[in-house]
Amino acid sequence: MSRPKCASPAKTTYGLAAGVWTRDLRLAHHMAAGLEAGSVWVNTYNAFDSGSPFGGYKQSGFGRDLGSYALEQYTNVKSVWISL
């Protein structure tokens, strides 16, 4: 069985959230992977958990709020090399 290509119904520079309604779990995973959105809901919409990162793709935001990914915004990685 061939799978449909994931296409955005509207060409947009935003990607905050998307919703997929299907009974086919494989198709749901395929669609979720192909959609350029920070949150993808399957058979539900607007569900949140404070431990899950929230943020958008493209012009819908920079970085993530909530969850452990949000902490990365407050850290910087540094390499220090010392020759003794």
Image (spheres, helix red, strand yellow):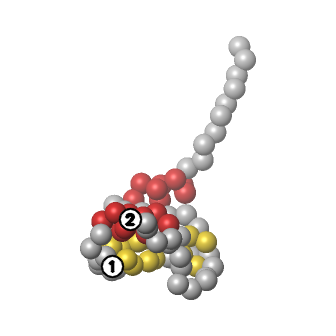
Tell me if residue 73 comes above or below residue 2 in the rendering. above
Label 1: state its secondary structure: loop
Front position among marks 1 and 2: 2
- The reply to whether the C-beta atoms of the residues labelled 1 and 2 are less than 8 Å apart is no
Q: CA distance from mark 1 to mark 2?
A: 19 Å
The amino acid type, in three-letter code, at marker 2 is Met
Question: In which quadrant of the rendered view does residue 14 lie?
Answer: bottom right
Q: Position of residue 60 (x, y in %)?
A: 57, 76
- Tell me which residue sits at (39%, 59%) in the image: 67
The local crowd at label 1, few if under 14, some if 14 to 19, many if 20 or more residues have their Cα within 10 Å, is few
Farthest residue, direction left: 23
Left or right position of 68 against 6: left
Q: Secondary structure at mark 2?
A: loop
What is the residue that sits farthest to the front in this orientation? 1
Q: Residue at x 30, y 69 (%)?
A: 24
- Identify the mark at residue 1; answer none if there is no mark: 2
The answer to whether residue 71 shows anywhere in this view is yes
Task: Check residue 38 in the rendering and tell me which mark sits there, or answer none.
Answer: none
The quadrant of the image that shows the C terminus is: top right
Q: Quadrant of the N terminus?
A: bottom left
Amino acid type of the residue tagged 1 in the rendering = Trp
| Residue 4 vertical placement versus 26 (above, below) | below
Residue in the image at 55% along x and 50% along y:
75
Using residue 78 as the reference point, say whether residue 20 is left or right of it. left
Q: Earlier in the sequence, mark 1 or mark 2?
A: 2
- The residue that label 1 is drawn on is 21
**Would residue 61 appear left or right of 38 to someone viewing this image?**
right
- Please tell me in which quadrant of the rendered image residue 29 appears: bottom left
Q: Residue placed at 70% from the left, 22% from the top?
A: 82
Q: Name the outermost residue toward the top.
A: 84
Can residue 54 be seen here? The reply is no
